Amino acid sequence: MINPIYVPYREKARDLIQEGDVLLFRGRGIVSKAIQKVTQGRYSHVGLASWHSNDNNILELVEFREWKGGRTTNFSRNLEKFDRQIDVYRVLSPKKVVTFNQDDLSFSERWVNFNPHDVTYELRKMTGLPYGLRRIWWMAKFYMFGLRFLINDPTIYDDESREVVFPVCSTAVAACFSKHGFDLIQNRSDERTTPVDIARSPLLSYMFTPFKDW
């Protein structure tokens, strides 16, 4: 478990947050606590940081929120409600990709840079879609003792990038990353990815936790 590094938002943190930073929420409500309990982690929600294209003075949260669907909101409004509960993670870029050549049994290496605008653009395109409550039930079944032993669905390990069906916060974020070459969790379908899974991604590193200073 990380030890939070608290940074005042308006004084410093706001200028440190970059396009495409992953924002993970440690909610304290009943629903948030239930998600944390079931997924065995500290996070209950996830979204992306994005600077408004026409005004770089406005930092936005792009997310899929329960009962709201896909949307963008002013990040400072979220901080008022979730003060000291939003952890900022950043993509480790560039990443090394190692490929095995079957013909001559050799390895090749290349470095891939992360383009944050591509990923946030993908998530912005999904705003306005309804929140996928059916996806929550589908994911919950795999955590229920008894039911999970009766389910045989090989797609839960499918890493192939595809359009997400019945999106929720974590599945939408994971799919947007995968579409642009940064699969956050290998050997797990984007459609089964939880906020806790994203926090454990080897492609991300914790930065800091902003707090309200107004």
Image (tube, rainbow, N blue to C red):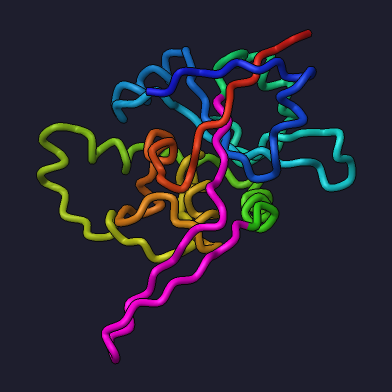
- Residue closer to the observer: 69 or 4: 4
State the residue lying farthest toward the top. Answer: 214
Q: Is residue 121 magenta?
A: no
Q: Which residues are magenta?
A: 87-114
In the image: residue 179, left or right of residue 192:
right
The residue shown at (52%, 34%) is 46
Residue 65 can be seen, yes or no: no
The residue shown at (72%, 19%) is 9
Q: Is residue 204 above or below residue 2?
A: below
Q: Is residue 211 above or below residue 177?
A: above
In the image: residue 96, left or right of residue 17:
left
The residue shown at (39%, 69%) is 98
Query: Splitting the image into 4 quarters, where does residue 130 fall?
Result: top right
Q: Position of residue 28 (x, y in %)?
A: 47, 13
Q: Is residue 119 above or below residue 78?
A: below
Quadrant of the drawing holding the N terminus: top left
Q: Position of residue 60 (x, y in %)?
A: 73, 35
